[in-house]
Image (cartoon, grey):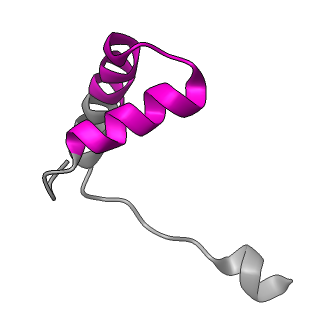
C-alpha cells in the first residue's frame, strides 16, 4: 500500500482467493488494523535462544 500498489494487491488477493473486491478490501482493512494494534507495542524482544540450541 505504501508503494501505491493497493489496487493491484487487492485484485490479486481477490483472484487467488475467489473473493469479490469488497471481500479483499475488508481483509486488507482488517490486516492493517491488526498491524496498527501490534505496532503500538515497542517493547518487543527477539529471543533466538532456541535457534542457538539447535
Measured along the vertical axis of the image, is residue 47 above or below residue 19?
below
Quadrant of the rendered image containing residue 27: top left
In depth, the one of 44 and 2 nearer the eye is 2
User: Is residue 15 found inside the magenta-colored segment of the image?
Assistant: yes
Is 1 positioned to the left or the right of 54 in the image? left
Residue projecting furthest to the right: 54
Quadrant of the rendered image containing residue 16: top right
x and y percent of residue 36 in the render? 22, 38
Measured along the vertical axis of the image, is residue 41 above or below residue 14?
below
**Quarter of the rendering occupied by the C terminus:** bottom right
Measured along the vertical axis of the image, is residue 30 above or below residue 12?
above
How many labels sit on residues? 0
x and y percent of residue 47 in the render? 57, 71
x and y percent of residue 39 in the render? 25, 47
Seen at 37% across and 60% down, the residue is 44
Is 48 positioned to the left or the right of 46 in the image? right
Range of the magenta residues?
6-31
User: Is residue 38 found inside the magenta-colored segment of the image?
Assistant: no
Is 19 positioned to the left or the right of 50 in the image? left
Seen at 14% across and 54% down, the residue is 2
Seen at 27% across and 34% down, the residue is 32
Mainly helix, strand or loop, the magenta region? Answer: helix
Is 4 positioned to the left or the right of 24 in the image? left
Seen at 21% across and 50% down, the residue is 5
Amino acid at each position: 500500500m505504501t508503494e501505491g500498489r493497493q489496487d493491484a494487491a487487492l485484485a490479486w488477493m481477490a483472484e487467488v482467493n475467489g473473493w469479490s473486491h469488497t471481500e479483499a478490501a475488508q481483509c486488507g482493512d482488517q490486516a492493517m488494523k491488526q498491524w496498527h494494534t501490534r505496532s503500538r507495542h515497542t517493547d518487543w524482544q527477539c529471543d533466538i535462544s532456541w535457534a542457538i540450541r539447535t
